């Protein structure tokens, strides 16, 4: 089973991202579940969503405490919330930022994980460019697909088409492809 924890703020599409991720896994022929955890339910408040993807039926329904991947949709949470608690030793960290992990003050985390396992992608900027709004959730999923291979990009695109109106889906798919391309460049560097 592959477990993902997504962190962001209300209004950034963190809950939707977990749902779309789980649907993409279904399109890949796998089992999946997604669910959120949030407090004050207001725009800008911290939000956590969880997703599990497996080859067999998933019986666990508690929050993900030992993630294989942590996706940080809002980098302002980095030094205010313990985002990396329980992260597997070979875990993957994907952060929405124009800055490098070192510039974000994550040198220790970067040193603890193999090279190219702590990655940043400018998802908000890509969303502005392709979608016309600063909603980075689908961009982050495109980067996640390229970084981990846990879901296939065509399955993600199918899930996005199912979730959003055609014009919004098309723009988000272009943004997700751009984010995936960025990860491809990072991995080949």
Image (cartoon, rainbow, N blue to C red):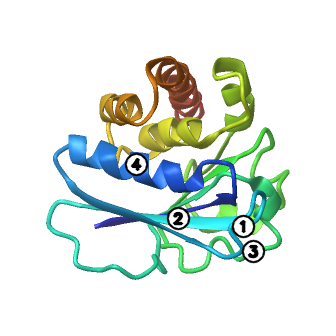
Gap between marks 1 and 2 measured at Cα:
10 Å
Q: Quadrant of residue 81?
A: bottom right
Numbered disc 1: secondary structure = strand
**Residue at horizontal 40%, vertical 82%?**
62
166 vs 158, nearest the viewer: 166
The residue under label 2 is 49
Task: Name the spot of residue 144 as percent of width and height, x first.
Answer: 49, 44
**Residue at horizontal 72%, vertical 74%?**
40
User: Where residue 107 is drawn, which disc sits there?
Assistant: none
Gap between marks 4 and 2 measured at Cα:
11 Å
User: Where residue 21 is drawn, which disc sits there?
Assistant: 4
Gap between marks 3 and 1 measured at Cα:
9 Å
User: Where residue 81 is drawn, which disc sits there?
Assistant: 3
The residue under label 1 is 46
| In the depicted structure, whether residue 174 falls above or below residue 109 | above
Mark 1 closeness class: few <14, some 14–19, many ≥20 residues within 10 Å: many
> Which callout, 4 or 3, points to the residue nearer the camera?
4
Gap between marks 4 and 1 measured at Cα:
20 Å
**Residue at horizontal 73%, vertical 34%?**
134
Label 3 with label 1: CB-CB less than 8 Å: yes
């Amino acid at each position: 089973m592959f477990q993902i924890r997504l962190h962001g703020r209300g209004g950034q599409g963190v809950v939707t991202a977990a749902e779309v991720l789980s649907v993409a896994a279904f399109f890949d022929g796998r089992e999946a579940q997604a669910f959120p955890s949030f407090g004050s339910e207001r725009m800008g408040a911290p939000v956590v969503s969880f997703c599990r993807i497996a080859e067999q039926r998933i019986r666990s329904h508690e929050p993900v405490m030992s993630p294989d991947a942590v996706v940080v949709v809002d980098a302002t949470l980095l030094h205010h919330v313990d985002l990396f608690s329980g992260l597997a030793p070979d875990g993957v960290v994907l952060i929405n930022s124009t800055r490098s992990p070192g510039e974000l003050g994550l040198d220790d985390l970067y040193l603890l994980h193999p090279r190219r396992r702590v990655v940043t992608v400018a998802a908000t900027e890509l969303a502005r460019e392709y979608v016309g709004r600063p909603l980075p959730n689908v961009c982050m999923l495109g980067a996640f697909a390229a970084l981990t291979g846990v879901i296939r990009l065509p399955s993600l695109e199918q899930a996005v088409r199912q979730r959003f109106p055609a014009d919004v889906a098309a723009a988000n798919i272009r943004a997700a492809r751009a984010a995936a391309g960025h990860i491809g460049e990072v991995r080949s560097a």
